[in-house]
Image (tube, helix red, strand yellow):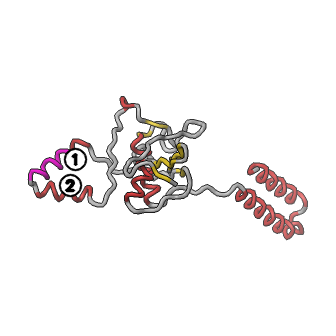
Amino acid sequence: QRHRAQRDGDHQRDADADGVGRHYEVYRDVQGWRVLSMPARVTLVLGLALPDQARVALNWRGAGAMPFRKIAYHDLYVLATRSAAGDRQAKTELRRLLEDQVVVIGASASGLYDFRPTPIAAQQPGVALLATAIDNLKNDRYLRESPVWAPLMLSLVLVAGLLALLDRLTIHYGRTLIVSVVGLATLSVGTVL
């Protein structure tokens, strides 16, 4: 597929039907052009492969609104200014903080209205969604959705196992146990469907 420009990336966040952000777009198809998301662009710039799907289910790291290390912009600015002025200690500290890291600059002030509901927090900063999407694509950590038939197959295997067990237990415990277990198995299969 064709890509839009070399270094840009889209930062649209589409919520699921219930308004909760569980997915992030890898790309958006616009009239035959694949417009990559910012996390996808970062992943390509790092020389890593992208999944061949339009969006991925996010795998959240830990609990809380900001699971990644935060550095106040002011502190980073002061450190960079001191480093540029020749302060060796500041230069070493700056290198320790930023070398081989993906840095996402964003704001989390409530007045900026860049908060979204996620499975982790009712109001999560948009920069945390962006960082999570970059982390998921960069480290191949996004969630894979199981095929539609997988829960049904699991239920059928469990029911078959229960029936085999019941065949052995009928001698000792009678029909009441059999009816109870078959009823529970039927209920579990019905719940999956």
Q: Nearer the viewer, residue 58 or 169?
A: 58
Mark 1 element type: helix
Task: Give the residue drawn at x 47%, y 40%.
Answer: 12
**Amino acid type of disc 2?**
Leu
Locate residue 185 relative to residue 124 in the image: left or right: right
Magenta span = 76-85
Residue 91: mark: none
Rounded to the nearest whole Å, what is the CA distance between mark 2 and mark 1?
Answer: 8 Å
Q: Nearer the viewer, residue 14 or 146?
A: 14
Q: Quadrant of residue 101?
A: bottom left
In magenta segment, residue 84: yes
Q: x, y percentage for residue 22?
A: 54, 45
Is residue 110 shown to the viewer in this render? yes
Mark 2 element type: helix
Q: What residue is pinned by disc 2?
A: 94
**Amino acid type of disc 1?**
Leu
Task: Give the residue drawn at x 38%, y 57%.
Answer: 45
Q: Nearer the viewer, residue 76 or 154?
A: 76
Task: Give the residue drawn at x 37%, y 50%.
Answer: 7
Task: Give the residue drawn at x 55%, y 50%.
Answer: 54
**Most common secondary structure along the magenta stretch:** helix
Evaluate if marks 2 and 1 touch, with contact meaning CB atoms under 8 Å apart.
yes
Is residue 22 shown to the viewer in this render? no
Mark 1 closeness class: few <14, some 14–19, many ≥20 residues within 10 Å: some
Q: x, y percentage for residue 29?
A: 54, 46
Q: x, y percentage for residue 44?
A: 41, 58
Q: Nearer the viewer, residue 69 or 73?
A: 73
Q: What residue is pinned by disc 1?
A: 76
